[in-house]
Amino acid sequence: MERAAVAAPDTDALLGAIPSAVQQLVGCGPVFAAASDPLSLHFTRAARREISDAAAAQFMALEAGTPDVVKFRELAVSRDPVDSLMNATDSTPDMSRRWREVIEPLGWGDELRVACRDGGRTWGFLCLHRGGGEAAFSGDDAAALREVSPILAAAFRRTALAGAGVRDDATPGPGVVVLDDELVVTSMSGTAAQWLETLGPADAGLPIALMSVAVHALSSGDPQTVAVITRDRRWLSVHASVLHGPDGRSVAVLLQPAHPIDALPSLAAAMHLTPRETEVTEAVLRGLSDRAIARTLAISEYTVQDHLKHVYAKTNTRGRAELAARLLLG
């Protein structure tokens, strides 16, 4: 597992290596693995093995807004980053709607979930399943995943920026995808179709980032946004809003080019920048001088330079030009 985590050059490669590695580690069948934005906790990339499109869509629909045990976002902030369905329900899985509506009808058994945490933030998730006739996940299984969770989290954090860049060639303009309340696409623009091709492997027929913002928008009624890196090295903003009409609710997902500054909070988390270091970094990316930064933030130029020294050390750069290149060009 550690070799796979260290060797992966980017998130897609990491996700591609995880299913077989965890299957060997604890012995399981179907596997879902996802990278997540550390601030919004929206999925940004995903890989799955032995899970159909239809099952993936059911899992996604139940994940947002439906009370249940061991939900990903709750696991992300719990004391223990690993838990199983059988353990959480005291071996009475019928308590779980996810069990009743998806897992049991599929003939599967226990489910174990993992939040991959590093630096106090969650960078990815795992979900493992056993067959209906197989033993539930044991304490030793949970301990093994608990041990490798920080290793995977560090790999998710490391690869979060891999491949990021600013392209000089023509970038598609904004595009819109409209889904009904069952997450079925009812219409989309031609530009949206172009963007979807660049968002990486699809989950339930759609990229996981789009599914993530859509289900949470429908559940909460609030707009949802996440900035992601496309496969062709562009920053893309994925924004979902609920629509109300005579035929009921739907959700519109706007896909539009984003500047790395839009993703700076997540980038800062990946590099362990403090809030003030993040403010200084944003000012640098906007082209402000030390004097202008000092004036804007109401601090001395000496303090600005001190913050920049820490930023350079954390980002392994030696000046403004390298810092900008590191964040803007990957």
Image (cartoon, helix red, strand yellow):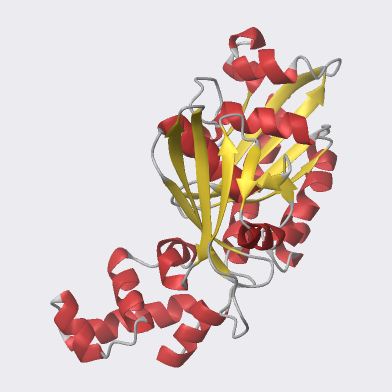
Q: Residue at x 38, y 39 (%)?
A: 222
Which of the pair 178/30 is nearer the observer? 178
Total marks shown come to 0
Q: Is residue 267 visible?
A: yes
Q: Residue at x 18, y 75 (%)?
A: 297
Give the answer, above or below, for where 52 lies relative to 6: above
Q: Position of residue 311 (x, y in %)?
A: 39, 78
Q: Is residue 135 visible?
A: no
Give the answer, above or below, for where 109 lies relative to 312: above
- Answer with the quarter of the image where residue 231 lies: bottom right
- Answer with the quarter of the image where residue 298 lies: bottom left
- Answer with the quarter of the image where residue 301 lies: bottom left
Which of the pair 158/287 is nearer the observer? 287
Q: Position of residue 186 (x, y in %)?
A: 63, 40
Quadrant where the C terminus sits is: bottom right
Q: Is residue 243 left or right of residue 92?
A: left
Give the answer, above or below, for where 166 lies relative to 241: below
Which of the pair 97/216 is nearer the observer? 216
Q: Position of residue 176 (x, y in %)?
A: 55, 53
Q: Residue at x 66, y 29 (%)?
A: 59
Q: Is residue 183 left or right of residue 13?
A: left
Q: Is residue 101 left or right of residue 303?
A: right
Q: Position of residue 238 (x, y in %)?
A: 52, 55
